[in-house]
Amino acid sequence: MIPFDDALKAVLAAATRMEAVRHPLEDAVGLVLAEDATSDVDMPPFRKSAMDGFAVIAADLATPPATLSIVEEIPAGAVPTKAIEPGQCARIMTGAPVPEGADAVVRVEDTEPGAGPGDVIIRKAVAKDANICFRAEDVARGDVVLRAGGVIRALDVPTLAACGCAEVPAFRRPTVAVLSTGNEVVPVGRVPRAGQIRDANAPYLAARLRQLGIEGRLLGIARDTPAALRRALREGLESDVLVVSGGVSAGDFDLVPAVLGKLGVEVLFDSVAMQPGRPTLFGRREGCLVFGLPGNPVSVLVAAELLVVPALKAMIGYADPNPPRRRARLLEATRHRPGRVAHVPGVLSQMPDGWAVRPLPYHGSAHVHALAGANCLIRLPAEAAELEAGASLEVVELDVRG
Ligand code: AMP
Ligand code: MG
């Protein structure tokens, strides 16, 4: 049995970053940029109008109202053909280039038609440069808009698009196979018969992978026979990562470790001083990392959050793949069996005097519904049996996005 921290270290040491490839921009959210992204254009690309109105010479409006003659209309997408002289203006739309000679734009709301067909009355004075966006005032051609190593967010996509990054150099997402095992486990669409239980693990793992932008390869449910496991595990080993749940403990039908061994998987650890999740197995074969998680759904969730997700983040290229931790004050006394670090579901909240955490009612690793209201896992140290209210503890924040 190895300490939890050593298990995480071993996982992160084995989880090497994937190669950089070019991804379509729409598919890049959640990936890590492999090179600095630069702009191939100035932004704005030219001196342009920020309003629908009239391009004018500000000095012409020193004593409003003033009547100006309209020399042309410049819709967005057009190029002005005339320079503006004193007494003149151009009708201009938002996003259109401001003509030579003009040094301000008056909003259409501050004007009214003049007496002649080509005239406009401007009712207000306007400051020089008003309602004009200047070329390259946001970004100059060649500027770095996003640094290598950053996670690409949806927020970054419009900038990357405007800068011409139709394809983004980013580290590849690993392919991840997901396998449930157990004679008693039935697909979620089935009503379990006597002795059966629905597969809670594969749907969870698939959903969690999606939060990381990974479409899991779902291999279904293997029966607890060497032949069925061999067939399914062999297929799973074709992926960059294989996550199998169930069948790794010490029971008569826990055949996964033996079958993995026969398939050439080198086991790096098969027992971790954590509760739940003790029989968690981690191994590798050629290009594939293998996680064998004990079948109870809370064990799967805890081991996935604390070991599998960090591995995936490291492979995607996150600068810090570790589970997001913070310290919080325990709001209720809690006890646990010492010897292994325990992770129990809790609710973390920010109080006026700092972060605080409340443990949720929890009956053990099959009590998956305990997680329904949780937003963190509370880490109860291996050495402490009783924890007083007020104790400062480490918690692992769970990803609570939709
Ligand atoms: P095992 O690790 O195979 O010994 O399974 C431990 C417990 O988890 C047993 O009660 C199993 O019925 C249950 N279990 C195993 N796999 C799943 C699954 N995919 N979904 C829900 N419960 C499971
Ligand atoms: Mg089983």
Image (spheres, grey):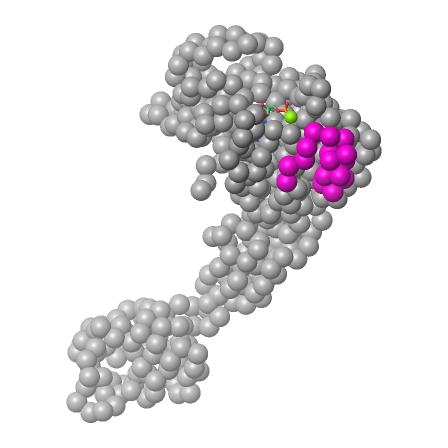
Above-or-below relation of 399 to 298 = below
Indicate yes or no whether the magenta region holds residue 107.
no
Magenta segment boundaries in residue numbering: 220-237
Where residue 273 sits, quadrant-wise, is: top right
In the rendered image, residue 368, in percent from the top left (x then y), is placed at 49, 27
In magenta segment, residue 225:
yes
Where on the image, by quarter, is ligand 1? top right
Q: Main secondary structure of the magenta part?
A: helix
Measuring from the top left, give residue 157's x and y in whole percent.
51, 57
- Is residue 38 positioned above or below 257 on the image? below
Location of the C terminus by quadrant is top left
Q: Is residue 268 positioned above or below 45 on the image? A: above
Q: Is residue 305 visible?
A: no
Residue in the image at 63% along x and 57% along y: 23
Residue 383 in view of the camera: yes
Residue 281 at x, y percent in the picture: 70, 26
Residue pictured at 61% horizontal, 29% vertical: 184
For residue 89, side relative to residue 344 (left or right): left
Residue closest to the eye, 290 or 296: 296
Q: Quadrant of residue 15?
A: top right
Q: Residue at x 69, y 38 (%)?
A: 242
